[in-house]
Image (cartoon, rainbow, N blue to C red):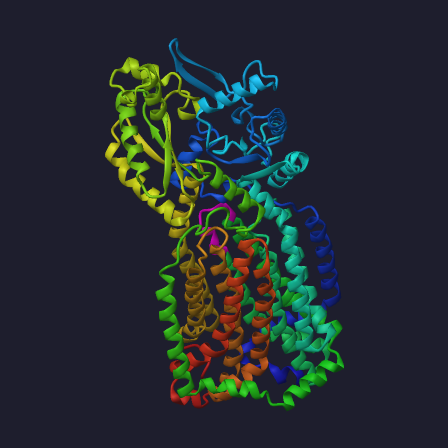
Amino acid sequence: MTVQESYTLDDSDGRIRPAIGRVIFAARVPLIALFVIATGFFGWKLTQLRADASFEKMIPVSHPYVQNFLASRDDLKGLGNSVRIIVETRDGDIFTESFQTLLQRITDEVFYINGVDRSALQSLWTPNVRWQEVTEEGFVGGSVIPDDYDGSPRTLSKLRENTLKSGQIGRLVANNFRSAIVVVPLVEIDPSTGERLDYATFSRDLETLVREKYESDEISIRIIGFAKLIGDLIEGAALVGLFFLVAFVITAILLFLYTRCLWLSFASLLCSTVAVVWQMGLLKVMGMGLDPYSMLVPFLVFAVGISHSVQIVNRFGHFIYHRVSRVDAARLTFVRLSKPGFIALVSDGVGFFTLRVIDIPVIQELAVVASTGIAVLVLTNLILLPLVLSFTGVSDRCVRYRADKDHSEYRHWRFLSGVTRRGPATAVVLVCLSLFAVGIWFGQDQQIGDLDPGAPELRADSRYNIDNAFLTENYSTSTDVFVVMARTREQQCGSYDFIAAVDRFQRQMEAVPGVQSALSLVDVSKLVIQGMNEGSPKWHDISRNQYVLNNSLSRAPNSLRNTDCSMAPVILFLDDHKAETLNSVVDAAELLAPRYESEDLQFQLAAGNAGVEAATNIVIADAQAKMLLWVYGVVILLCLLNFRSVRVTVCIIVPLALTSVLAQALMAALGIGVKVATLPVIALGVGIGVDYGIYIYSALQFYLHRGEPLTVAYFEALKSSGTAVAFTGLTLAIGVGTWIYSPIKFQADMGLMLTFMFFWNMLGALIFLPALTVFFYSREERSGNPTVGKPG
């Protein structure tokens, strides 16, 4: 063993890691060449990566509600994934030749956009929008647009009359007659190519072929719907990249101020960036893409890489300061930090991978994206970084700066090490226990799902949410639709027993808070029966006479029953899709359905965008506790395997648990619901936070094993690892803190939550963890005992 090795290695380093270190550094040049080639390959693959999003990826496809919806998707035209284009005139009303010509052009333009379900397209200019009335001669009706329409005042007057008779006021036509809607149902799979619908391309087509082409000083175009929301989020990816760049620059500046060495800063940034390149390239190799909800994960991988890099360059600088050669310093750094670094990264990766227990494809893919990035860091930061440092070395300025820090005796760390004394430790533990109680109390108010109207992923003043608010204010029917599917035997949806049961169920549901109105086959039957009896309100009811009932249903549109008359949807228009509203509707529907069901009738939940979101909320509510148990279970197991000590594991895990509890309370206080966009943050925060505890305790254990008293051991641990942990926590908190100003609200929410979790995980590792050790070691052990830190 060389002099340099005797300076750092002891029994805890074993023999395997020094041997691996010698092999790796004996092949420095070939290994770095291999890394360069691999980075070039994955960089090339990165250029081919595309945004990937779909409606089905956002929903829990195995949930019974969603399975019921997917089984009936072909029979529920327009009640699934669709877009609404609102054409508004700023002068007069819609019954002018110029406006109708424009509406016709937009309808025709949209008809040919790739991804549109053309058979279900609806506007005043499509033949499936009809009017009808009762006359002395019976029922008459036809298309809303008159057959002889020529734009003359006469035909425009006829158009107005037909529109009033169509029942589309408040649905396709605004209550004030100043705007009209084109409803655009979508198909997930292009029947001609078999490819998934490209939401980014579809959104751009809507912008270029509709909004940019037809919007003017007199005409306003508003577009809402899931596809447009995803398109706006993908469009905002450029802003995500901008904030990534800002965070990168901030990290680079703070990293240089910390190391005072361009080479150390460059090496850290280089290897963490290489990890991101590899991660993105691997996604393409695996046939995956980046959806809007996983676009932030590459920065998290970069953040984890910086976290480990700071520990490595800190230890490397320490060896260089003690006059160890560059190659030996890099090799010894690898030997000393490869084990805690590997355990921390495995904890991160497996913790992220546990997100796959949530049965929502977009979160399961996020788990793969995040864990893939963490796996790459094992190579780029634990191996490549020491190899790079063996060539770059450290600047003289860095050595002088470290000497100055040593001469200052780290006064701040000496003060903080006092937390390992009984009195301060007791105070810290009591404060943390109080914070646990506060977090648990306020965390009870945490809700599942959206807590705001519109699209919570975007700011309230975003163009999309302004467009959505316009529709809510000017139309009678909401865009939030909850559909209950009433099923019976074939050709029996017109039977009296079926219609009567649906009628009773519908009337009960209309009285549920949050339900604006309802629509079903029953409404058509009542209107026709009333019309056949001179329009008398007394006849606005269903008939027990099957012949009368059959006649009344013969005029029902195809959208209110399927082709074999075995299913009829009960369509509920809701006030909004807030968690409280959805919970109320779901509870009422599940309570009422069994009352009216029979051997030949079942009410199945749920379709429509609100029904799908209700299912998503249920899955998230069920999976939240399961996910946390898996994350903490994996982290606890790996800590036990690494330290072989229950008390050490408790000291590392309890501060993480405090951060999770406080984070849930913060979400409740700020009105951030647990949903697809925010649920993974808790797991990501735990995964990243465990790094701090592992590095701090690994250093503390090293000095305890040498027989140092606890206070002295912790002071030395702070000097070797505490500075790096504090720097990493503050730097990453500042970096992701810039996200708070993002126009994409879910990125701002993630930035706020991650800033909080980075900061509190750092405080937990530096203050709470050492305070806990005071209560897990005897007085003799705290006074200095070479057996402390060994398995126990």
Residue 173 location (% of width, % of height)? 50, 30
Judged left or right of residue 26, residue 145 is: left
Residue 517 location (% of width, % of height)? 37, 35
Hey, which quadrant is residue 248 in on the image? bottom right
The magenta stretch is: 353-362
Name the foreground residue: 58 vs 337. Answer: 58
* Vertical placement of residue 35 versus 365, above or below: below
Assign the N terminus to one quadrant of the image: bottom right
Assign the C terminus to one quadrant of the image: bottom left
Q: Residue at x 50, y 33 (%)?
A: 174
* Vertical placement of residue 376 versus 692, above or below: above
Name the foreground residue: 423 vs 609. Answer: 609
Hey, which quadrant is residue 252 in on the image? bottom right
Instruction: Let me know if residue 312 is in the magenta part.
Output: no
Q: Residue at x 47, y 79 (%)?
A: 767
Residue 437 location (% of width, % of height)? 35, 70
What's the magenta bit mostly, secondary-structure-wise?
A: helix
Name the foreground residue: 213 vs 98. Answer: 98
Judged left or right of residue 69, residue 362 is: right
Q: Residue at x 55, y 61 (%)?
A: 751
* Vertical placement of residue 566 versus 424, above or below: above
